[in-house]
Image: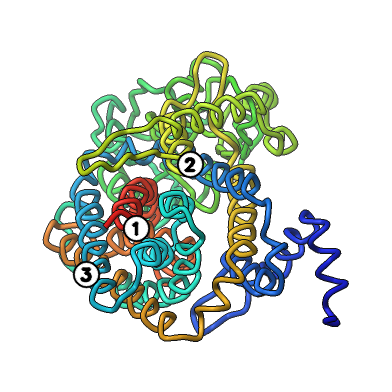
Amino acid sequence: MSVLQPVLDVLAQAPILTVFLVIGLGTAVGQIPLGPIRFGAAGALFVGLAVGALDPRLGANLTLLRSLGLALFCYTVGLAAGNTFFRDLRRQLPLMALCVLALVLAGGAGGLFSRLTGVSPAMDSGAYAGALTSPVLDAAIEAAGTQEPAVGYALAYPVGVAVAILIVAGVVGRSWPGRRDPRPASADGITATSVYLLQRVALGEMEAFKEGRIRISYLERDGHTRVVAPGEELLPGDKVVIVGAPAAVEAAVHDLGTGLNKCLAKDRSVVDFRRLTVSSTRVAGRTIAEVDMPGRFQGVITRVKRGDLDLLAREDLVLELGDRVLAVVPSDELEKAADWFGDSERSIAQIDAFSVGVGMALGVLVGLVAIPLPGGITLRLGVAAGPLVVGMVLGWVGRTGPFLWGLPHAANATIRQLGLLFFLAAIGLASGPDFAASAFSTTGLKVGLLAALIVAVNAIVLLAGARWAGVSAQRAAGGLAGLVGQPAILAFALSRRDDERIEAGYATLFALAIVVKIVMVQVLVAL
């Protein structure tokens, strides 16, 4: 009798204990740096494989947990990416078309390599999902009817992450011509400057103001300070505060007058400002224009802090739960404005169980629909793409009457991470015995080479095509991270270059790539 047998018996009888033990140890392993790489949540997969290899009983009866974790992960990704996906749909069509082409060509190249080297179609489909670090493994397992794709996934995953990070490292800092994708103004941050006007100007006729490149808050005229009105006509001798990207503010100062040595915002006796947290459902899901700060509080919103990004408060910007708006209002209106926005950290720590429940149910229902494809293949979006697609649509819609579909940023990230950890731990435990039999073998070497080939083909097609189409290196690098589907690659890219185009490229292709991968893994199994 093995020394570990009593421990394994306890773990087999308490699957919840086993899962959380794997998650805890896996998270610790995922934080170990291997050069520029940290595997993060994927550590749960590797620890699960190691623990599961000790006893097949440890991975039994975890199908429900695996499906629940995957559905939660994909639904929350869809909610977060939906608005960006549909908003940038036309602008990013070239990158999206390249993403589809790259994934199809990489699948074809991988399938050819597998035939030449004797790798089974089921293993090939798992390696395809693993090399692209995607949660579509469930679709491959369902199509194959065995756990063999999970073995290919586990063997290919670390290779895919390493190769993708090396490629992104060589691309993200480059500055090739991006004629269709200029550097965003927000990349330089947001600044505020007090200005002394030397000429008369109507805000409605000022191009920078109309186009949302700058915001104007304070107005001092004849010794009296107030908040500027939207249709205001500014006069020579007026003093105002202009907010925007440094280049836009500098141009506005040049057009209007000259900079002041003092800051108007330091005098808070008549006009005051504060960061207010959007926690009220009557505000979230509405644009800055719809909130109507001038009409409600004789004030203005100049900036919106979302996560770590400080955004200029354009009139068409949609507010989300958890946003922190910089409101400039008369001092006696500040508390009323705070009540209107909610300004409660506790409120945004809670989720609307109704919207999550209905949204998830719709996603699972859509995933059950069978779609016939040529060649006798039947496509089901399943518990991955069903919730993902529904989440994207609901994230784009934002709200339906009084119901908000979105989640606060922190809550979304927490649910997403927990869902992914449940999924990876369950998959690792179930696949452990098969993985142990294949890792240190000729099959393991073949799958490693297959994974490198799949990532390389995707990178060549996407990056070369992006450069030809006039897409910036930064958006293309973010797009590659989204195509591969690994948050660690996105974090690495952002650590090298702080540019919102990286995140935009990631968000746009992440959801699209998952849908394409779900189709591809089923095609690869059928070959």
The earlier-in-sequence mark between 1 and 3 is 3
Confirm whether residue 247 shows in the render.
no
**Residue indicated by mark 1:** 483
Q: Which residue is mark 2?
A: 80
Q: Nearer the viewer, residue 165 or 243?
A: 165
Across and down, in percent, residue 310 comes to 49, 49
Q: Quadrant of residue 13?
A: bottom right
- Categorize mark 2 by other alpha carbons within 10 Å: few (<14), some (14-19), many (20+): many
**Residue that label 3 marks:** 112
First in sequence: mark 2 vs mark 1: 2
Q: Earlier in the sequence, mark 3 or mark 2?
A: 2
Relative to 504, 194 lies left or right: right
Does residue 17 appear in the picture of this structure? yes
Secondary structure at numbered mark 2: helix
The location of residue 195, given as percent across then percent down, is 40, 44
Circles 2 and 1: CB atoms closer than 8 Å = no
- The three-letter amino acid code for the residue at tag 2 is Ala
| Element assignment for label 3 | helix
Label 1 to label 3, Cα distance in Å?
21 Å
> In the picture, residue 81 is in which quadrant?
top left
